[in-house]
Image (cartoon, coloured by chain):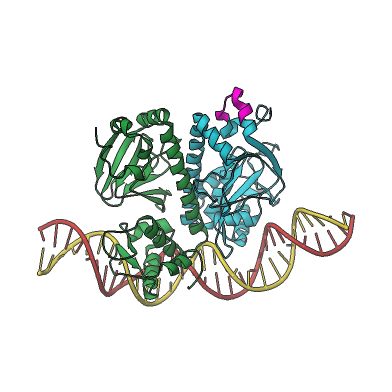
Chain colours: A cyan, B green, C red, D yellow
Amino acid sequence: MHRCLVCEIRDQSVCRAIDDEDLVVLAQSSKQLSLPPNTTLIEEGSAATAFFNVTAGTVKLFKSLPDGRRQITGFADVGHFLGLTNAGTYSFGAETVDTVQVCRFMRPQLETLLADYPQFERRLLAEVTDELAEAQEQMLLLGRKTARERVASFLLARMIHRPCQTTGEENRVSLPMTRVDIADYLGLTIETVSRTISALRRDHIITGTDHHGIRVLSPSRLRGLASGQENA
Amino acid sequence: MHRCLVCEIRDQSVCRAIDDEDLVVLAQSSKQLSLPPNTTLIEEGSAATAFFNVTAGTVKLFKSLPDGRRQITGFADVGHFLGLTNAGTYSFGAETVDTVQVCRFMRPQLETLLADYPQFERRLLAEVTDELAEAQEQMLLLGRKTARERVASFLLARMIHRPCQTTGEENRVSLPMTRVDIADYLGLTIETVSRTISALRRDHIITGTDHHGIRVLSPSRLRGLASGQENA
DNA sequence: TGTGATTTTTGATATAAATCAAAGACAAGC
DNA sequence: GCTTGTCTTTGATTTATATCAAAAATCACA
């Protein structure tokens, strides 16, 4: 019952909308789960019964076509929620990328929270509004950017939104997802993603041979590339 | 001050969250504007001072790259709002497609409404959640669908969401926007859009020679195409 | 620590859609 | 009703990325 009180990422998530004295309610409304990599959190098209708040790790959200083509619509990491919908069923799927910890709210409990705490609803509206802005940015990427621009945008966004302060290395970007996931996120094939990363390395814009982490040598050139300035 | 009371599309918009007796407040918080085609409602990157509710016509929302490449992220028509953002500036632009009527809420008034009427905020959250789901669907289209599938998806969505009940013609789809707009929405060029529409006509899936309106002959084949079943 | 399976990279070729180019249709203004 | 400009369609060619194929690197598990 003190889980939420000691939660280290509370102020990074929607939960910061709830005051300390009401945290017991929050803790009682949710359940913490620990999930191994590649666990299905949400089955596309299944009944929308739960809502999740990610407290550790990364979750991928995606939509698929009947023949298996898949588009990852986003990666939800620490502090992000997922599973909000007006429809009775989820219009998307969700799977863990690495080991993930989530707080799960069942729908009725979530409804109660929203009704009882207007500031929680306010906070959620702000989060969804941000997600929509991100989605619009991604539509620009998918509809109008070249492969090189897409990969540059992706690396840049991860560098900015997920600063890797663990090691002393400057501008380190962690890529916990596979090339398949990156490709499905950027609307490319794994071969194109791989070739493009190799080309950026060849051009001394990034460095590092590790598959799941690279270092950005020139953030400014990367920024230029991401916004369509070829070269620089 | 009775403008909102006699508003014919109130129950199609966020305004339906406000009770009849409080409509005066709503009317006082907003101002109705009538705008000719191709009017800029929101300049990309400008200060986010207003929020709009579309009561007639169609508005296009878009994001651009410095070199002019543009991605239309959505079309807002009757009942849709636009201009919501957490940032101080708009991350997208908005322009009228045809003659448009909007109710404009200045930011402070909107904040007051949100604070005073939780059900208004609730309604807005639901709307943004829907928009996000639509954006995810569009990401699947932009990242993973062929030109033929994109055009089929577009026509199908317009057929479903904007039924044209004016004429006796069954399954009529109105296309008030130009080919440039359709191309910028689907992540294609105008030539590809044009060729694809011609091909669908050749295959007797659609008919009509009018540039701004077509008729769907086989909704089921269109549905099949849109979800990736080539032929059918 | 070795071994098979998986993931990533690199190479050769194919192709869907872009680009370049021009003709035809439509709309607005005189 | 003609003229002028814009929008749309169609055609020829190019190109960025996909596809097909195989080698190299990494990972997981014994």
Left or right: where A60 falls relative to C6: left
Query: Residue D16's x, y, as percent?
Result: 51, 62
Answer whether residue B142 is magenta in the image: no
Q: Residue at x 62, y 54 (%)?
A: A181
How many numbered discs?
0
Q: Is residue A2 above or below residue A179?
A: above
Out of B230 and A198, give the one closest to the viewer.
B230
State whether residue B88 appears in this view.
Answer: no
Q: Quadrant of residue A101?
A: top right
Q: Pinpoint residue B188: horizontal percent, then vertical percent.
A: 43, 61
Q: Is residue A17 left or right of residue A8?
A: left
The question of residue A17 being in magenta is answered with yes
For the magenta stretch, what is the residue range?
Answer: A16-25
- Residue A118 vs residue B88, the one in the foreground: A118
In terms of image quadrants, where is residue D18?
bottom right
Q: Residue B83 appears at what percent x and percent y?
A: 38, 40
Q: Main secondary structure of the magenta part?
A: helix
Work out whether residue A169 or residue B181 is closer to the camera in this orientation and state it: B181
Q: Is residue A184 visible?
A: yes
Q: Residue D25: x and y, percent?
A: 74, 57
Q: On screen, B116 above or below A144?
A: above
User: What quarter of the picture does the N terminus of chain A occupy?
Assistant: top right
Q: Nearer the viewer, residue A24 or A218?
A: A24
